[in-house]
Image (tube, grey):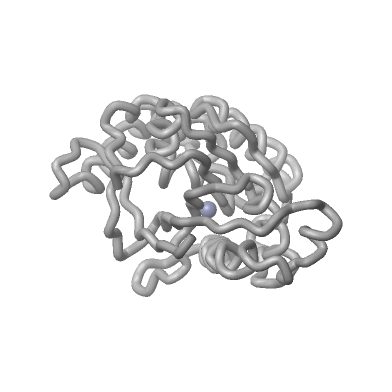
């Protein structure tokens, strides 16, 4: 994908998903003056094998790690919805929250997880975030009578988003070159310390590098990230 957007909204189910799947793209775009906003849907409060820690303690750590990672990349703002990890539902309340962010950020590109993985396991929060985000982009954010209260009471005008990039897809059709910013991506991924117990910095860097190399294979990029692109008429 060669077009450079102006404003991007990243909808991430858990702290660490966005950096792992699209941190390089975010870093590359920010270097080109793109404005990037995050919505963090859950608090990540279940992602541990440590039996001594509570969900509340873990959530505080992980939300801080998300803020730190976003700072490494240069993300303008992280809006935290604080849903409990594993408890996202495909309902009007969650959809309204995403529509609110779309209408206030007014992005030309939205990034979120692929909801339709068939053969690879996928966390339910990823599936639901992807579905909710697609439905929020079209038609809910576009048509003012969806969530009319956002328009009437909060002054949030309807908005048309041109492109959604889905990460974690089995059907990638779009690659973005991250060769020049791989080091920034690695640093952002490493901000999620709570998710990396037992792995050395070198192992983490090698893992990120290997995945980026696979994503770039066949496209002439040394390192890339891969997405499925969905376009909408604007
Ligand atoms: Zn996740």
Compared across the picture, whether 49 is left or right of 173 comes to right
Q: Residue reaching furthest right?
A: 153
Quadrant housing residue 80: top right
Q: Residue reaching furthest front?
A: 234
Q: Residue at x 44, y 37 (%)?
A: 26
Q: Residue at x 50, y 49 (%)?
A: 108
x and y percent of residue 117 in the render?
40, 69
Of 61 and 174, which appears nearest the observer? 174
128 up-or-down from 225: above or below: below
Q: Residue at x 22, y 47 (%)?
A: 214
Compared across the picture, whether 203 is left or right of 219 comes to right
124 up-or-down from 19: above or below: below
x and y percent of residue 169 in the render?
36, 61
108 up-or-down from 28: above or below: below
Q: Residue at x 55, y 47 (%)?
A: 107
- Total labels drawn: 0
188 up-or-down from 22: above or below: above
Of 80 and 47, which appears nearest the observer? 80
Compared across the picture, whether 69 is left or right of 60 comes to left
Of 23 and 57, which appears nearest the observer? 23
x and y percent of residue 166 in the render?
42, 58
């Amino acid at each position: 994908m060669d077009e450079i957007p102006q404003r991007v909204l990243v909808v991430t189910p858990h702290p660490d998903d966005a950096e792992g799947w699209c941190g390089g793209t975010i870093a590359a775009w920010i270097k080109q003056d793109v404005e990037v906003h995050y919505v963090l849907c859950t608090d990540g409060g279940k992602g541990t094998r440590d039996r001594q820690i509570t969900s509340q303690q873990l959530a505080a750590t992980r939300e801080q790690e998300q803020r730190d990672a976003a700072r490494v990349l240069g993300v303008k703002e992280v809006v935290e919805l604080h849903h409990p990890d594993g408890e996202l539902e495909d309902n009007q309340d969650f959809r309204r929250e995403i529509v609110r962010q779309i209408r206030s950020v007014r992005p030309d590109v939205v990034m979120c997880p692929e909801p339709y993985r068939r053969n690879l396991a996928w966390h339910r929060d990823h599936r639901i975030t992807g579905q909710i985000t697609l439905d929020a982009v079209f038609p809910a954010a576009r048509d003012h009578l969806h969530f009319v209260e956002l328009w009437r009471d909060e002054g949030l005008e309807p908005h048309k988003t041109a492109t959604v990039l889905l990460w974690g897809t089995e059907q990638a059709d779009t690659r973005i070159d991250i060769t020049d910013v791989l080091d920034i991506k690695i640093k952002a991924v490493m901000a999620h310390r709570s998710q990396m117990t037992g792995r050395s910095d070198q192992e983490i860097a090698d893992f990120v590098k290997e995945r980026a190399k696979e994503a770039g294979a066949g496209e002439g990029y040394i390192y890339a990230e891969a997405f499925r692109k969905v376009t909408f008429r604007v």
